[in-house]
Amino acid sequence: MGFEPEHAQWPPLRLARVSRELVSVVVVSPLLLREFNNQEEDEVRSVGRSIGLDVHRDFCEVAIAQDGEVRSSGRVDTTPERLELFGASLHPQDRVALEVSGSAWEVARILERHVARVVVVSPADTGIRQARAKTDRLDARTLARLMAAGELDAVFSPDEGCRVMRRRLSRREQLVRARSRAKNEIHAVLVRRLVGRPPVSDLFGVKGRRWLAELDLPLEESETIDACLRHIEFLDSEIATVERQIASEALRSAEIRRLMSVPGGECDLRGELHGRGRGDPPLSKPPGAHRLPGS
């Protein structure tokens, strides 16, 4: 068999002739920025300055973010006088960020009248706890950097009236817990000495105290019961005092009186101001507190 040439097509097949795609071209004009004078440049620079504070009991570590750079700026003593001097040295358009701590609200109160904004953030939102390298200086720099990037969300900042109410409610909660511990200690004595259930409904009322005094217990157990009863009496007086202060302050607030007019308003009021649940013991009210003025 000889060589037989195959049929060939000319010109050769080109992919461009088989498939064609239409491509749209979009021309984007560059962004035109107007020129700023020196005064406007200073304003833009001051708005972009963010300050991070790592607050401790004795000092605050300071870091400043400005023009894309973050630098440490030393420490400030955590005293009202030093914080006032530090706040006076800041620009009115500066922004300050710090984490929630025991003294964070007082630091924020001192600085907020010197700067444009004070942001108190939750430590869970900053990522500082999960950082591998964790120092006071690095924490302050992280806060300043996040503040400059606009990535910090402030927690709820109550006004002074709400702060006072929260502190009083918190004190009442601690007093009630201390009273419960004293009562539980008396119940523990009865369990240790195999004493049955008391024949009264209220062990710490008049009849219950009389029943406790008639029990035949060892000397150390009687001393424990007597000490706990004295402690309970003292705590009862303290709880009554702080409850009168809370009720008096609540009746002077139009918002709280409006909230108390709703059924179940007392429990909702405690939950709104202090984040407490419906299972907490209710506050005792002065005579006529259940009625609104003019009703």
Image (cartoon, rainbow, N blue to C red):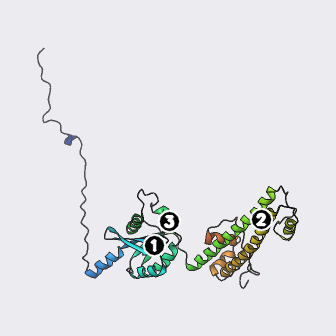
Task: Point out which mark residue 122 bears.
Answer: 3
Q: Which residue is mark 2?
A: 224
Mark 2 or 3, closer to the camera: 2
The residue wearing badge 1 is 59
| Neighbour tally class for label 2: few under 14, some 14-19, many 20 plus, Cα within 10 Å | some
3 and 1 marks in contact (CB < 8 Å): no
272 displayed left or right of 137: right
Question: In whole angstroms, how far apart are the C-alphas of marks 1 and 2?
Answer: 44 Å
Picture quadrant where residue 91 is located: bottom left
Between disc 2 and disc 3, whose residue precedes?
Answer: 3
Secondary structure beneath label 3: loop
Toward the front, the furthest residue is 219
Return the x and y of residue 197 as percentages of the image width and height.
84, 58
Considering only vertical position in the picture, is 241 above or below 232? below
Where is residue 20? Give x, y as percent.
23, 45
Write the residue at 61% across / 72% down: 273
Amino acid bearing label 2:
Thr
Label 1 or label 2, whichever comes before in sequence order: 1
Are the residues tagged 2 and 3 within 8 Å (C-beta)?
Answer: no
Which numbered disc, 3 or 1, marks the residue closer to the eye? Answer: 1
Q: Residues within 10 Å of mark 1 (few under 14, many from 20)?
A: some
Q: Amino acid at mark 3?
A: Ser
Answer yes or no: is residue 266 visible: yes
Does residue 149 sit above or below 295 in this rendering?
A: above
Q: Is residue 141 left or right of residue 57?
A: left
On the image, the x and y values in percent for residue 78 come to 47, 75
Relative horizontal placement of residue 258, taking residue 188 as reference (left or right) = left
Which quarter of the rendering shows the C terminus?
Answer: bottom right
Q: Quadrant of residue 33?
A: bottom left
- Residue 96 coordinates in the image, percent (x, y): 42, 73
